[in-house]
Image (tube, rainbow, N blue to C red):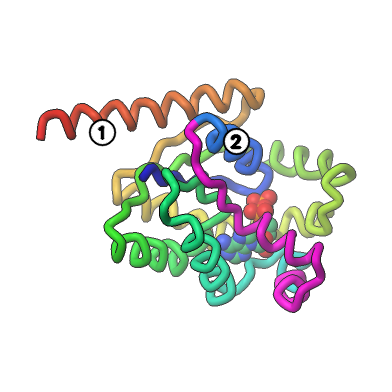
Amino acid sequence: MLNIIIFGPPGSGKGTQSAKIVEKYKLIHLSTGDLFREEIEKDTPLGRKVKEYIDKGLLVPDKIVLREFYCRASEHMDSPGFVFDGFPRTIVQAEALDRMLNRQNIPINLVISVEVEENELFKRMMSRSEDSGRSDDAEEIIWRRIEVYKEQTLPLLNFYTKQGKLATINGMAPVDEVFSKISHAIDTYLEKKKILSDIK
Ligand code: ADP
C-alpha cells in the first residue's frame, strides 16, 4: 500500500492536488472536509452537528472525526493506498491514525506539506468564496481557520518530521508546477523504497 498525507493550511490547494495524485497513482482520496460537506448537503444528523463547528471555522471534535474516518477508511482497506486530505488535523488524530494503521501493519509512507504564505491563502479563499458556495469561506471565518490551523494542526509538522516522513513543497506556484514537484517527491520515495527492498 502507498499511503500519503497531504498536509497544509486551508486554501493551500490540498483538494486540487489530492485529485491529481489519486488519478496518477490510482489511490483512494479520503477527505474529511468533503465527507462532512456531503453530510451537510444531505442534511443528516451528522451533517447538522458538524455544521455548527465548520461554520464557525472551528475543528470538528476528534471523536466525531475519528469515528467517521474509521468508517470510510475501513471500506477501502484492500485498495492500493490512500491520500488523506485534511486528516489528521490534530495530534490526537495523528496518534489514532498511527495506532489504526500499526494494527494492520500498514505505514504512512509520506507526508507532503504544501507551503503557502498567509496573505496568499486569504486571497485564494476570498476569491473562491463565490464559486465554492462554502459557508466557511467568509472573511472572519477564513482568519479563524488560519488561526486554528496554526494552533492545532501545525504541531503535526514536528510529529511527522520526527518520523522522517515529511516532504515540503512550495505551494506558491501554478497548480501543474506544484503537482510536478509533488510527483517528484512521490517518485523519489518509491525509488528509494525499491532500492531498499532490492538490497534486502
Ligand atoms: P480547508 O483545508 O480548506 O479548511 P477542509 O475541507 O479540509 O478545508 O475542511 C473544512 C472544515 O471541515 C474544517 O475547517 C473543519 O471544521 C472540518 N474538518 C475537516 N477535516 C477535519 C478534521 N480532520 N478534524 C477536525 N475538523 C475537520
Which residue is located at x 66 percent, y 59 percent? 35
Q: Sequence-wise, which precedes: disc 2 or disc 1?
A: 2
Task: Using the image, tell me which numbered label, if any, was put on residue 17.
Answer: 2
Give percent across and percent down for residue 99: 34, 66
For the residues labelled 2 and 1, say whether their Cβ atoms are less than 8 Å apart: no
Q: Residues within 10 Å of mark 2 (few under 14, many from 20)?
A: many
Residue range (magenta) = 25-51
Give percent across and percent down for residue 133: 86, 51
Is 46 left, or right, of 131 in this rendering? left
- Type of the residue with mark 1: Lys
User: Disc 1 designates what residue?
Assistant: 193
Residue 48 vs 157, above or below: the answer is below
**Is 29 in the magenta?**
yes
Q: Which secondary structure dominates the residues rendered in magenta?
A: helix
For residue 47, what is the image quadrant?
Answer: bottom right
Which residue is located at x 15 percent, y 29 percent? 198
Q: Quadrant of the N terminus?
A: top left
Which residue is located at x 24 percent, y 30 percent? 194
For residue 175, what is the image quadrant?
Answer: top right
- SS under mark 2: helix
- Type of the residue with mark 2: Gln
Q: Residues within 10 Å of mark 1 (few under 14, many from 20)?
A: few
Give percent across and percent down for residue 6: 51, 44
Which residue is located at x 89 percent, y 44 percent? 130
Give the camera-side residue of 115 and 83: 83
